[in-house]
Amino acid sequence: MTTAAPHRRTQLPHDDGSPVRVLVVDDEASLAELLSLALRYEGWEVRSAAGGAEAVRAARKFRPDAVVLDMMLPDMDGLAVLGRLRREQPDVPVLFLTGGDSVEDRVAGLTAGGDDCVTKPFALEEVVARLRGLLRRSRAATATTSRDGSVLTVGDLVLDEDSREVFRDGTEIRLTATEFELLRFLMRNPRRVLSKPQILDRVWSYDFGGRANVVELYISYLRRKIDAGREPMIHTRRGAGYLIKPAVG
């Protein structure tokens, strides 16, 4: 893990002025302390937990706005912890930490409902930047974003920007905050091909350092939820990008 020079803090306080709350879950005490210090420097309130059961208890009392969660914990793995956290806070953004450059670990975490993933060793500044992005997307997804009507419709797919509900042919589809933002961007631009750089800039709002394959991953997650067992609506234009349009037939 590396450190970065101090930067201007972006506190992202709540409407009542209270600080953002972040739960850090990692059994490496030194790493958890470094992360906590970096996040407190942002002006955020931080709690830490060294195991999965402790994390679930802490989240219940602390009600975090975001969670940094190690995939490997002494009592249960991160995916099990995620499942228990999401039962009580379905929309809390989760940033996974993985112990190696394993594509399988990253895919497993994101497929299970994690919102982002960072591989150890990492720069503290990167974790902070990704958390800021997750928090902004989570807030954007819960905010009222349209004065003239908050419902987007493409074919039989309906997205309500106010309630964050998504339906296809009357069946509700549950999405993470990041999946919701990606789908909203696609649905605001029906039949328009959107490039990976455009999607990264709009949905993630920061440079992924060449890891544009995160767009491919999230497109695949959306397809599993939106198109599974149905006529496809999300399409790939090789070398150009992705688009959404009403299903044929």
Image (cartoon, rainbow, N blue to C red):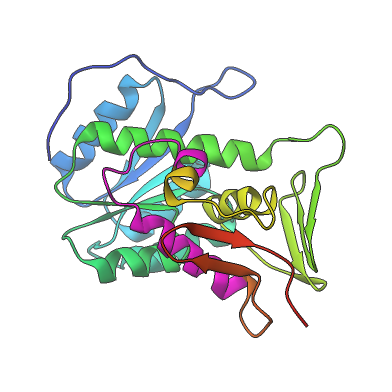
**Frontmost residue, 199 versus 54:** 199
Would you say residue 91 is visible in this rendering?
Answer: yes
Residue in view at x 59 percent, y 60 percent: 243
Residue 226: quarter of image: bottom right
| Residue 25 as seen in the image, left or right of residue 188 | left
Residue in view at x 60 percent, y 67 percent: 234
Would you say residue 89 is visible in this rendering?
Answer: no
Q: Position of residue 58 (x, y in %)?
A: 43, 47
**Looking at the rendering, in which quadrant would you find the C terminus?**
bottom right
| Residue 60 as seen in the image, left or right of residue 189 | left
Eyeballing the image, is 42 above or below 47? Answer: above
Eyeballing the image, is 185 above or below 206? Answer: below
Residue in view at x 48 percent, y 43 percent: 198
| Residue 6 as seen in the image, left or right of residue 84 | left
Q: Position of residue 118 (x, y in %)?
A: 27, 50
In the rendered structure, which segment of residues is drawn in magenta? 201-225
**Frontmost residue, 63 versus 115:** 115
**Frontmost residue, 13 versus 136:** 136
Q: Position of residue 153 (x, y in %)?
A: 80, 57
Residue that protrudes farthest toward the right in the picture: 148
Q: Does the magenta-highlighted stretch encompass residue 206?
A: yes
